[in-house]
């Protein structure tokens, strides 16, 4: 599902780009300046303007990348390796966010995944992207400034972004063995349920709502205050403990990263953190990112011990979808991972790809070992998530 292009074409959405970010055709330069930056401020206006004028995803949002590079990357001993592209007037027209780190002696040049980012995408000004990508020798110029590495690992890449990465860095896109899954919402919650949700899911939701009514009813809250947001992320961490092998949020560092991103993004609508209360007591939480009408689901934590008969996870997804429809959003993106429950929500799959380069013998050996370990982890995660958690 290429929902990105559809979402970006809707200029009426409150998160859409401003009209002042256009570059006229006459201003398009015939040459570009390409630089490698070890320091860059993602909160400065020039990046905000580029991001708003690009087709990048929520995972390249200024707030998200700022916290990636200032908190998570240093803790992972990863150094910034950002490629910037400027036109003849020194305007930023492209940016490729990368990191460089050493893992078991292997130098990895990679995208800003670090276990928290689901989509890798270059940030290119849409008015000049086609001409930029067609520039002869651009790929070689970028390659000449990249830091020495044993493995270049660009992932996860949505299918609609694979050609862009290939034009910038070369290589051949490789299917990663998993997909992202998203459901289009329409403009009416009842119609979405009838047309998208499978019959068995509708039945489970009906039974859950009856059980909730017996227990005093439920209320969905979209959290805004610092105290609520921090308490919610701490609760998610606690509720997920022991459920998912290698769960990143079990590290306080990652929990705090999510909290800072949620706090910074709450007021502008970039982050959406929800709490479901049953009989005025917290029963579950969902955290995600919002950008151009798409809600990217990232985390769920539910008190299944107390509320298992109420199916709090399924009720959360359903009620959040209702809230998103009321807000004018168009897509609920369950993001990457092939957990079976996602299909019950009428999702369509988008294959995920990677670009890899192994210029050294050490890199070639290490890639084989890394991939075997990751396949085992994905298999465990898929089993853990089969019941509807992430």
Image (tube, rainbow, N blue to C red):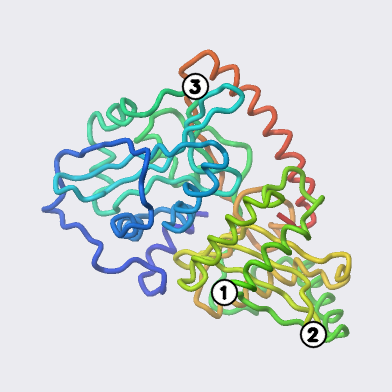
Residue topped by disc 1:
324
Q: Position of residue 111 (x, y in %)?
A: 48, 39
Q: Nearer the viewer, mark 3 or mark 1?
A: 3
N-terminal of the pair, mark 1 or mark 2, is: 2
Q: CA distance from mark 3 to mark 1?
A: 44 Å
- Horizontal side, residue 200 vs residue 115: left or right: right
Q: Residues within 10 Å of mark 1 (few under 14, many from 20)?
A: many
Residue 358 drawn at (x, y percent) = 49, 21
Q: Quadrant of residue 279?
A: bottom right
Task: Describe residue 116's horizontal placement relative to residue 11 as left or right.
Answer: right
Above or below 232: residue 66: above
Closer-to-camera residue (122/330): 122
Q: Residue at x 71, y 47 (%)?
A: 247
The reply to whether residue 96 is visible in this rendering is: yes
Please say whether residue 191 is visible from this viewpoint.
Answer: no
Residue 46's spot in the image, x, y percent? 28, 56
Helix, strand, or loop for circle 2?
A: loop
Q: Residue at x 41, y 69 (%)?
A: 15
On the image, numbered disc 2 is attached to which residue?
A: 217
Under circle 3, the secondary element is loop
Q: Earlier in the sequence, mark 3 or mark 1?
A: 3
Horizontal side, residue 198 vs residue 159: left or right: right
- Above or below, 177 against 57 in this view is above
From the image, tell me which residue sits under label 3: 150
Q: Nearer the viewer, residue 272 or 77?
A: 77
In-front residue for pair 66/329:
66
Secondary structure state at the residue bearing disc 1: helix
Q: Residue at x 61, y 44 (%)?
A: 115
Measured Cα–Cα span from mark 2 to mark 3: 56 Å
Q: Dot 2, crowdedness within 10 Å: few (<14), some or many (≥20)?
A: some
Against 277, residue 253 (above or below) is above
């Amino acid at each position: 599902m290429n929902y990105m292009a559809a979402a970006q074409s809707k200029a009426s959405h409150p998160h859409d780009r401003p009209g002042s970010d256009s570059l006229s055709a006459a201003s398009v330069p015939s040459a570009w300046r390409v630089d490698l930056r070890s320091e860059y401020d993602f909160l400065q206006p020039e990046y905000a303007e580029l991001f708003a004028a690009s087709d990048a995803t929520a995972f390249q949002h200024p707030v998200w990348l700022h916290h990636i590079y200032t908190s998570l990357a240093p803790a992972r001993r990863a150094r910034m390796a950002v490629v910037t592209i400027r036109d003849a007037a020194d305007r930023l027209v492209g940016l490729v966010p990368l990191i460089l780190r050493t893992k078991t002696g292997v130098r990895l040049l990679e995208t800003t995944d670090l276990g928290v980012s689901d989509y890798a995408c270059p940030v290119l000004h849409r008015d000049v992207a086609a001409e930029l990508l067609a520039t002869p020798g651009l790929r070689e110029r970028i390659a000449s400034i990249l830091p020495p590495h044993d493995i270049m690992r660009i992932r996860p890449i949505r299918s609609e972004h694979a050609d862009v990465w290939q034009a910038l860095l070369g290589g051949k896109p490789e299917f990663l063995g998993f997909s992202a899954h998203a459901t289009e919402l329409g403009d009416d919650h009842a119609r979405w349920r009838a047309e998208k949700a499978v019959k068995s899911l509708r039945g489970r939701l009906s039974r859950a709502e009856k059980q909730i009514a017996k227990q005093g009813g439920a209320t969905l809250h979209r959290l805004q205050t610092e105290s609520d947001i921090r308490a919610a992320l701490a609760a998610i961490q606690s509720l997920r403990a022991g459920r998912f092998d290698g769960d990143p949020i079990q590290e306080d560092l990652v929990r705090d990263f999510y909290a800072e991103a949620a706090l910074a993004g709450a007021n502008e609508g970039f982050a959406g953190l929800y709490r479901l209360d049953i009989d005025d007591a917290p029963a579950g939480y969902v955290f995600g990112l919002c950008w151009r009408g798409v809600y990217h689901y990232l985390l769920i934590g539910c008190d299944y011990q107390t509320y298992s008969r109420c199916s709090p996870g399924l009720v959360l997804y359903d009620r959040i979808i209702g809230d998103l429809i009321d807000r004018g959003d168009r897509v609920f993106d369950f993001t990457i991972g092939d957990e079976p429950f996602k299909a019950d929500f009428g999702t369509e799959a988008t294959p995920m790809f990677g670009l890899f380069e192994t210029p050294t013998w050490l890199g070639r050996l290490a890639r084989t070992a890394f991939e075997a370990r990751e396949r085992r982890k994905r298999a465990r995660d898929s089993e853990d998530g089969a019941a509807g958690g992430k």
